[in-house]
Image (tube, coloured by chain):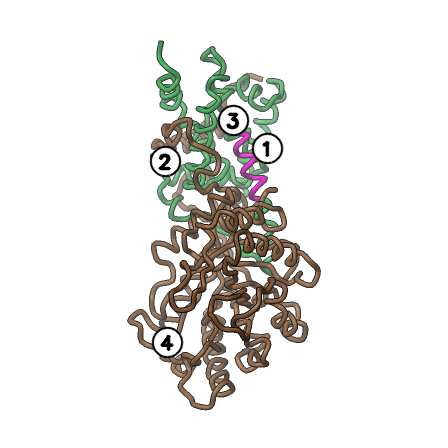
Amino acid sequence: MSGRPTPFEDELRHHLASVTQVPRGMSRWREGTAVQRHSRPWITWGGPALVAAVAATVVVSTGSTLLHRRPTSPALATTPGPARAGAGVVAWGLTDANLETVETAMGHRAALVRTHGSWGAPVVNDRVRQLTSAGRGIVHSLGTSDAGGNPVYWADVAGGKWDRQLATALDEMDALTVPAFFVMSVEPDDVGLPGCRAPGGTDACGAEFVAAWRHAHDIGAARGLHHVQWVWTVSAYSFGVSRADAFYPGDAYVDWIGVDPFNLYDCRGVKGPTGGPWRSFKDSTAAPQAWLSTHAAGKPVMAVEWGSVPGAPGQRAQWITEAAQTIQTPEYSRWHAMLWRNGSQAAPRTGCGYRIDDDPSSLEAFAAVGRSGHFGGTG
Amino acid sequence: VPDARAQFEDVYQQYALPVYRFCLTQLRDAALAEDLAADVFVSAYRAFDRAPAEEAGMRPWLFRIATNAVIDHRRRNRRWRQIMDGMLAAPREPAPDVEALAQLQAEAREALAVVASLSARDRTLIGLRVGADLTYPEIAVVMKMNVHAVEVATRRALERARAQAEAQ
């Protein structure tokens, strides 16, 4: 063989030669030999953006002689419906608070990040763009107030008052190439039943919420949006007192079941259903697990938020390690995503603190799980 | 005698663009390619005392690091893919990072789209040959193959790329 390039090879080379700029970020080596492993969030997986890079075809119509590519239809999933539990692996993530510190400890980026926004506010703001462009998926929730802090009522949502904002939010999420999970409201059953107008307690409030949820879901369906996964959740407490049913919109409107298990221990200063003994992850999820055994058959489960207070030194680290072991047992085979609530320091009012990035033993326990193969790591 | 840092600065100035182009051909995502290329130079700088003394050995040495980085990257990505396949019933057919790609010239995007449709091995060969401008003997060193085998394999890969381009 001659070793001489073929015309096609030359053409390809010529096309690539149009890349003439070295990105500034490439000179990181100049920071010196002191650059240590894990000194920054490593990309240990590229996320769907990278899957895209090797798998997708795109339409590029420049009239070039190199290619005459047939336009392809937008590569949306065509089958609506619930996600399936399958591969026996769990996405390991956390809330967007000191995220990078935790990722650095893990040695890779979180699979999913918990984000939150107000009604009417853009979902994909600068921060979400930053998170998702690096391949992280998001689990995004709206609260019960708008950007101005005014309450948003379920009855208004069901009545169409928020249709435009919902459509915009869902379109934004659907356009993401990373996994996008939508939690319309976290714990609508919370104390005081925010979002509810009707007097009459749980049942009446639940009915308002269900109507709002179904209406919102219909908006997405009418727009042909099938990328966004709908995650329904109520407090772990409600699962245990038969309150969850009143808020459940029905299998046809839900893709994932969300659970918020917490070990509150002594943080609220009271004994009882929201405080009390040191409870393992398994204990904290007993009520949701019981509900799941008779509801939402086959739907995958995620801990939309979960956590534990520190307890004695090392106690929370042990709690995390044991939780990870529990999740790998057959009874938890439907659990496919865990998002730690890396919340603030112990709140003055409740004394509850779930933050782990400043607690070395908890951080290492969390990171070690994240590095293990079952949770998407390489170990 | 220039110190290692100054020497490596020369290496960086000379090879930053070829390494970046190579990474682009492998990942087709400008941001990821930048990150991976940065990793390549960090690794190379750390190992610089083991780099070949002679100039001719530098390119194969550097691109051996780059190909290993790509392999490692793919391995980790497979794991993520498995997670998502498990999580989503109908995984979205992903699209490239449009924003980052838009920063590239249209010509480059076209070439990257063609290369992306090939197998990992074909991509590596074409990336080294066309993206990084390595000679066949240099590719042979990087890939631990003999020169003739490299040339045959690369030409076949280019044929497949051409067929891919024409078929669509």
Q: Who's the residue at 46% across and 20% down the image?
A: B48
The answer to whether residue A159 is magenta is: no
| The label number, if any, that marks residue B121 in the structure image | 1
Mark 2 Cα shell of 10 Å, populated few (<14), some (14-19), many (≥20): few
Query: Could you say which is closer to the camera, residue A252 or residue A188?
Result: A188
CA–CA distance between discs 4 and 1? 51 Å
Chain bearing tag 4 is: A
The vertical placement of A114 against A24, above or below, is: below
The vertical placement of A134 against A81, above or below, is: above
Q: Secondary structure at mark 2?
A: helix
What's the residue type where badge 3 is placed?
A: Ile
What's the residue type where badge 4 is placed?
A: Trp
Same subunit, labels 4 and 2: the answer reads yes
Range drawn in magenta: B64-77
Q: Position of residue B129 (x, y in %)?
A: 50, 26
| The label number, if any, that marks residue A162 in the structure image | 4
Q: Secondary structure at mark 4?
A: loop
Q: Is residue A17 visible?
A: yes
Query: Could you say which is closer to the camera, residue B147 or residue A28?
Result: A28
Chain bearing tag 1 is: B
Chain seen in brown: A
Q: Who's the residue at 53% across and 44% down the image?
A: A45
Q: Who's the residue at 40% across and 38% down the image?
A: B107
Q: Is residue B29 left or right of residue A324?
A: left
- Tag 3–tag 4 contact (CB < 8 Å): no
Looking at marks 4 and 2 on the same chain, the residue that comes earlier in the sequence is marked by 2
Residue denoted by label 3: B65
Q: Secondary structure at mark 1?
A: helix
| The label number, if any, that marks residue A25 in the structure image | 2
Eye-nearest disc, 1 or 3: 3
The vertical placement of A308 against A21, above or below, is: below
Q: Residue furthest top?
A: B1
